[in-house]
Image: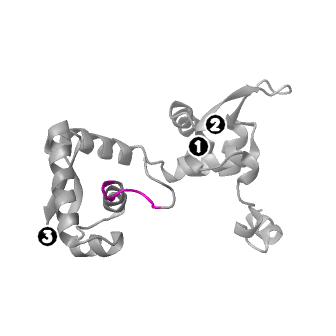
Amino acid sequence: MTDEASGPGLRAGLEAILLVVDEPVAETILAQALERPVPEISAALRALAAEYTAQGRGFDLREVAGGWRFYTRAGCAALVERFVRDGQQARLTQAALETLAVVAYRQPVSRARVAAIRGVNSDGVMRTLVARGLVEEAGTDPEGQALLYRTTSYFLERMGLRELEELPELAPFLPDDVENLEEQKQ
């Protein structure tokens, strides 16, 4: 434990800085940032690197290209690659983003209403959004008995929102002349 007034220890300070860098950092720069002599920084970095290796951590601290940086341990490369690849495949299509926006702003809403707003059938996209946990069933429409959908707490989490009221207003994103656009369509 460190005293609040004295700040974090040398090792914690090094870890904190190295965690956020995107390229190797020279010992002299670390020494300046932490206000410590270069030999002390050098010794601490080598000790941390040896400790991480001895503990079998999922990352290495390496000296490369004139500086130090964290890298994924070679034995974990396949796991990281799969994680990154799967994460990229999880991106939503334009159709899914449009559908999600309609649900978020009009909920609870039926598939038919989403399709009417978007102008295309959205059944497949809705199934995808439900499967990904972004949208869920919210009961049935009392008039037409259609299933209604709403966004989930996972949607709020992924969007970084505490509640739906934090969604931005749509008005600034709409054209100034909405009425004339509707007339031109007819």
Q: Nearer the viewer, mark 3 or mark 1?
A: 3
Q: Is residue 22 above or below residue 108?
A: below
Report the amino acid beneath label 1. Answer: Glu
Q: Are marks 2 and 1 in contact (CB under 8 Å)?
A: yes
**Drawn side of residue 50 relative to residue 146, left or right:** left
Measuring from the top left, give residue 186's x and y in whole percent: 77, 62
Q: Main secondary structure of the magenta part?
A: loop
Q: Which mark is residue 153?
A: 2
Q: Nearer the viewer, residue 78 or 89?
A: 78
Report the amino acid beneath label 2. Answer: Ser
Element carrying mark 3: loop
The residue wearing badge 1 is 157
Q: Residue furthest right?
A: 143
- Neighbour tally class for label 3: few under 14, some 14-19, many 20 plus, Cα within 10 Å: few
Q: Is residue 74 above or below residue 185?
A: above
The residue wearing badge 3 is 65
Q: Which mark is residue 87?
A: none
Q: CA distance from mark 3 to mark 1?
A: 38 Å
**Drawn side of residue 21 relative to residue 69, left or right:** right
Q: Are marks 3 and 1 in contact (CB under 8 Å)?
A: no
Element carrying mark 1: helix
- Neighbour tally class for label 1: few under 14, some 14-19, many 20 plus, Cα within 10 Å: few
Q: Earlier in the sequence, mark 3 or mark 1?
A: 3
Magenta region: 6-11
